[in-house]
Image: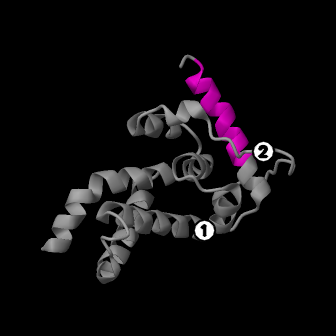
Amino acid sequence: MYQEKLYKEFYPALFSLCKLFFDDDHEALTSLNNGMLQVFKNIHAFDEQKGSLFNWMYTLVRNAALTQIRNNKNLFHTQQLPDGVDFSAKESVLKALEFKELYHYFSSLPQSTRTVCKLFYLDDFSVKEIALQLHISEGTIKWHLSEGRKQLKLILQPI
């Protein structure tokens, strides 16, 4: 009963998170359910002194989505950018947008590019951390960031 209540309460936000990773509703729901299974299995490990319940759940669900992506290796293109390209500065225009606006703009990106951009711009992962999480090269991550940046610039031009 409590598990069902917890699931229903956080479903909208966590499903929206998973939709940032997957175009297909079924895949998004699968990652959400895998994440929630981890929540229920590890609820005893939650420590409110370290942060909020939602943030803890968000991390577990995000990690479940990343695991699902890692298991689907053919999702990512293998194009790479040269090592000299720097992505250390986050786009300030993205910081000024509300989550709903970001979700809308990011949803227009291809799934693999959206995943990389979400981890980089919204979750503040470094290029190296994303490469480690997704088990793909840093050059491929940089390529996706470059492609995402190009597409988002076209979308955000009037802003």
Residue 22 seen in the figure = no
Query: x, y percentage for residue 113?
Result: 62, 47
Nearer-the-camera pick, 105 or 77: 105
**Residue at (60, 68) in percent of width and height:** 70
Mark 1 vs mark 2: in front? 2
Residue 136 sits in quarter: bottom right
The segment highlighted magenta reads 143-157
Nearer-the-camera pick, 43 or 26: 43
**Residue at (71, 53) in percent of width and height:** 141
Q: Is residue 121 above or below residue 105?
A: below
The quadrant of the rendering that contains the N terminus is bottom left
Image check: 74 left or right of 26?
right
Instruction: Specify the farthest residue to the left.
Output: 1
Q: Earlier in the sequence, mark 1 or mark 2?
A: 1
**Disc 2 target residue:** 86
Image check: 151 left or right of 32?
right
Tag 1: residue type? Arg
Circle 1 residues within 10 Å: few <14, some 14–19, many ≥20 = some
Query: x, y percentage for residue 72?
Result: 60, 66
User: Residue 70: which disc?
Assistant: 1
